[in-house]
Image (tube, rainbow, N blue to C red):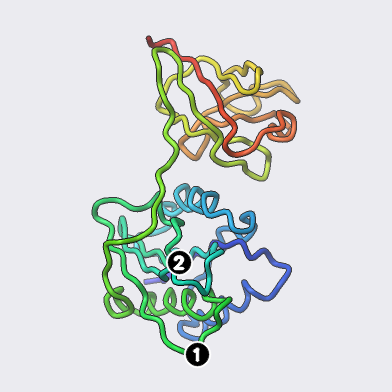
Amino acid sequence: MMKIITFLSDFRYNDWFVAAVKGEILKINNSVVIVDISHTVHPHDIHCAAFILKCVYKDFPPGTVHLSVVDPGVGSERKPLIVKSDGYYFVGPDNGIFSYIYNEQSEIYAIKITDGMSSTFHARDVFGPVAAKLTKDKKPEDLGIKIRDFVTFGFPQPQRKADTICGEIVYVDYFGNCITNIENSTHITELHIKKNQIAVKNFYGEGLPGEIICVRGSSGYYEIACNRGNACNILHVKTGTKVVAHTDVK
């Protein structure tokens, strides 16, 4: 069976960091398939990385190892983790990056650390090799100690009052589409952001060129978009900007 490791980080490609991690993985398992999710997460943006991971991890076959390293606390007392959840493995720092994949059945292990590693590059020296060992049939309990105390933060929940839902932008993608925390399953009739009233459309092209619209996004949440334009730049918004949606249910 083909073994897969995905790789998510804020390393970008200007330096040797991504290649170094992959090299250490291939030393241990030279037949593993390494799939890059993204390396352009804004530096140190753990919440952004957590959302990306939430959106993508189930698109891979069960048994995939998701290596996720956005690690501003590297070298500190924060724990390195293996997480087993929903039939997948997750490897990375204990800083909340796995918050959106944790559930009551998740098993969390603190990786056993050995001497002789860099204090600034645990992706290469700890996380990459551990991810590779999992693809060589090592078990989490072989590599770490099961724990119950770990860092987590909640996904921002919209607040509903009568026919109004108050939410916020939780992620902005490369195209400038602003993903909210209002689920697609909620029926809304219109959305307001920074005094702009935005109509709900079925798909991007249903809006006129340059028109700001709201659509049900592939992430499972409503998003604010612009047909052939960048909604984020036009509206001058960012993650955390508040939105108000209206429904026809009171």
Quarter of the picture holding the C terminus: top left
- Residue identifier under label 2: 92
Residue 217 lies, in percent from the top left, at 53, 34
- Vertical order, 50 against 130 (above or below): above
Q: Which residue reaches farthest left?
A: 105
Residue at the spot of label 1: 116
Q: Residues within 10 Å of mark 1 (few under 14, many from 20)?
A: few
Which residue: 74% across, 30% down? 234
Badge 2, how many Cα within 10 Å: few under 14, some, many 20+? many
Position of residue 248 relative to residue 131, above or below, is: above
Residue 54 coordinates in the image, percent (x, y): 44, 49
- For the residues marked 2 and 1, what is the alpha-carbon distance in whole angstroms? 19 Å
Q: Dot 1: what SS?
A: loop
**Amino acid found under the numbered disc labelled 1:** Gly
| Secondary structure state at the residue bearing disc 2 | strand
Q: Is residue 223 above or below residue 111?
A: above
Taking the image as shown, residue 191 lies to the left or right of residue 105, namely right
- The quarter of the image holding the N terminus is bottom left
Measured as percent of width and height from the top left, residue 201 is found at: 57, 21
Tag in front: 2 or 1: 1
Picture residue at 62% right of the left edge, 18% below the top = 198
Q: Is residue 70 left or right of residue 209?
A: left
For the residues labelled 2 and 1, say whether their Cβ atoms are less than 8 Å apart. no
- Amino acid on which disc 2 is placed: Gly
Question: Which residue is drawn at the image coordinates 61% and 79% (left, top)?
Answer: 20
